[in-house]
Image (tube, rainbow, N blue to C red):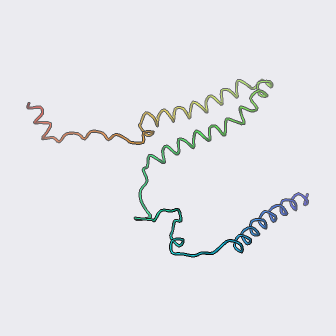
Amino acid sequence: MGFQYATVLVFAASAIGFCLVNLLVGALLRPRFPSKEKALTYECGEIPTGEAWFNFNPRFYVIALVFVICEVEIALMLPVALVYRAWIARGHGGLAFAEILAFTVILAVGLVWAWAHGDLEWIKRLAEPAPAPSARKAAQAN
């Protein structure tokens, strides 16, 4: 029994050692040319301007979450799809199909809800402001 744990320990030590050796070799072999540009926060070809903290469009997060939910659905459906034929052979096909259908319907209802509320539109239309009470009275008088 201890042999299995020793194998895992040797594997973990080998992986950590491999990483450390590669970092050491890289530190010894790579060229060093320090400069003011390389000391900047982002070395991506763009000079950083403005503040580091700024607001993102919150719709990005909603769209990203919907995407992640759909990806998780695919990741959870793939194993079921792979063994579905075996479940049918054992007589559990109807139950498995009902579970898959319920899972998909719940996610589809959530997607339809987000779509109906306009959360998937990148540029959201603002609601028309209600007219001021004095403007309403003037419109009614005409």
Q: In which quarter of the image is the C terminus?
A: top left
Residue 94: quarter of image: top right
Nearer to me, 140 or 122: 122
* Residue 128, position as x, y percentages in the image: 27, 39
The residue positioned farthest toward the left in the image shown: 141
| Residue in the image at 77% along x and 26% along y | 85
User: Is residue 53 left or right of 38 when viewed as pictured?
Assistant: left
Choose top left, top right, bottom left or bottom right for residue 86. top right
Image label count? 0
The quarter of the rendered structure image containing the N terminus is bottom right
Q: Whole-percent x and y of residue 113?
A: 47, 34
* Of 114 and 57, the residue lying toward us: 57
Relative vertical location of residue 114 with respect to residue 42 in this rendering, above or below:
above
x then y, percent, for residue 95: 70, 26
Could you tell me which residue is drawn at 41 percent across and 37 percent down?
A: 118
Please report the residue visible at 78 percent of the width from the left and 62 percent of the height from the top: 15
User: Image height check: is 125 above or below 92?
Assistant: below
Q: Position of residue 72 (x, y in %)?
A: 62, 41
Left or right of 138 on screen, residue 60 = right
Q: Which of 64 and 21 is in front in this view?
A: 21
In the rendered image, which quarter is residue 10 located in? bottom right
